[in-house]
Amino acid sequence: MARSVTRPGASRRRFLKTGLSLSAAAIAPTVIPGSALGLDGTIPPSERVVLGGIGIGNRGTYDLGCFLEQNDVQFTAICDVKENRRVGIKKMADEKYGNESCAMYQDFRELLDRSDIDAVLIATGPNWHTTASVYAAKAGKDIYCEKPCSKNIDQSLLLRDTIRRTGRVFQAGTQRRNLPHFAFACELARTGRLGKMKRVFAHPAGMTASTSGWLPAENEPPKEVIDWNMYLGPAAWRPFNAKLLDGFNFEKGGGLVGGGVLEWGSHCVDLCQWAVNDCPPPVAYAPPVDGHLVCTYDNGVELIFREKDWIPLGSCPVRFEGEDGWVEAGDSGKLVLSSPELLAGRTVEEIGGYPATFHVRDFLDCVKTRGKPKGNADAACNAHIACHAANVALFLGRPVKFDNATNAFVDDVEANRLRSEALREPWRI
């Protein structure tokens, strides 16, 4: 006969009391933070764009600040080959969110492996822009990439084609496309308000072209402090030298260093391309004469790199001339028009200082809607090819012709060698 066992201190009254307590706990409401529900103006996690950063230095820190201003962004990871930058950006993010959740990586592929990251901000040097963007697109991430977006013509085409094939949202860091006065100037040109277009002018920050070289070898720091091999990435190897670690436009490798034609051209030529309806790049390029480097579109419109004789409207000026009028604009936020009638009663908002906030917002909106942002990969490709081809003419010191059907220079072996450069393993893409 089985014997009943009574636990010490157990009683029917205690059993009932315990059961009632458990029942009450089961039906008690769970407290959910308002931020998780989108209350008080916050954005619920399901509506936020989860962002990672790759190569965040001076310019990248500014860009990241513009992203962090948007309440539907959650910055969650930083990758940089430099330890001090990783730590600095993590501190910036953790202070923003009041936690210690920002992860740090030294290899960007580990960041891209994270399935929770929707988009990446790429603000490395130009040496990495195309390669990192292609890896990101193949990993299913949307991309905001600083400019210049490519080092040569072949990379421009590869980047465009990869974005098309993968269906990712890509925004080049040509933020002036989202500033009202530049947009209005381009609208005047595109819509025929200036008459038939004759010339568009871009301002280069100097007209020099050269190949990058080596500097004397110095003691290489520990890998965890600076990963020199990863810093070089797809570029030809060369010994460590601290001077090569900085300098926004330093392009490591055997290809051309773009100088002002590529640096400012990434902005100014991009606006000129927009003014001519983002048509294919010019087909003829002549070396500079009296500070003017003249490129000619297939329809006869001229794209002119001009260093001097600008109306003082700030940096990055552009000018569009048609048969019936002209307009000039710069980073001051102001316009100068050949006739006040071109305004047609409109008031154009003046925003000086070329902020990226509007461009970032355009990107985020397109990430959510799967739309095409203003600085999309097709537009960036055409503007960059124009800059690269002009740079080839500048470097060779003679005219060159470019065929947009074949994306090659016409009957010019020497120029075609400059369309691309060899990439180090394992970074061939």
Image (cartoon, grey):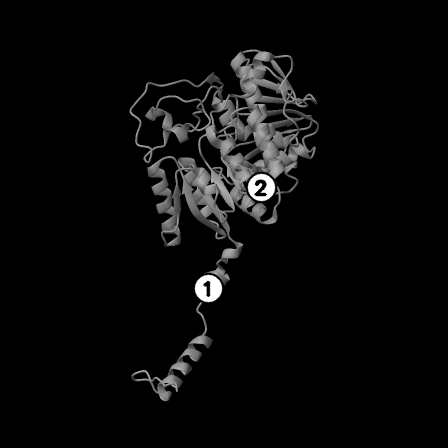
The N terminus: image quadrant: bottom left
Q: Secondary structure at mark 2?
A: loop
Left or right: where 192 falls relative to 252: right
Asked if labels 1 and 2 touch by Cβ distance under 8 angstroms, the answer is: no
The spot of residue 331 in percent (x, y) is 50, 34
Quadrant in which residue 61 is drawn: top left
Left or right: where 305 falls relative to 297: left
Q: Secondary structure at mark 1?
A: helix
Task: From the image, tell me which residue sits under label 2.
Answer: 169
Task: State whether residue 412 is above or below residue 260.
Answer: above
Task: Find the distance from the CA under tag 2 to the CA under tag 1.
Answer: 31 Å
The spot of residue 230 in percent (x, y) is 41, 31
The spot of residue 123 in percent (x, y) is 45, 36
| Nearer to the camera, 60 or 331 | 60
| Nearer to the camera, 396 or 214 | 214
Task: From the image, tell me which residue sits under label 1.
Answer: 34
Which amino acid is tagged 2? Answer: Val
Q: Give the number of the disc on residue 323.
A: none
| Residue drawn at 38 percent across, 18 percent down | 214
Crowding at mark 1 (Cα within 10 Å: few <14, some 14-19, many 20+):
few
The C terminus: image quadrant: top right
Mark before the other along the chain sequence, 2 or 1: 1
Which amino acid is tagged 1? Answer: Gly
Please state the total of marks drawn on the protein image.
2
Is residue 173 visible in the rendered image? The answer is no
The spot of residue 48 in percent (x, y) is 51, 53
Crowding at mark 2 (Cα within 10 Å: few <14, some 14-19, many 20+):
many
| Residue drawn at 40 percent across, 53 percent down | 97
Is residue 411 visible in the rendered image? The answer is yes
Left or right: where 377 falls relative to 51: right
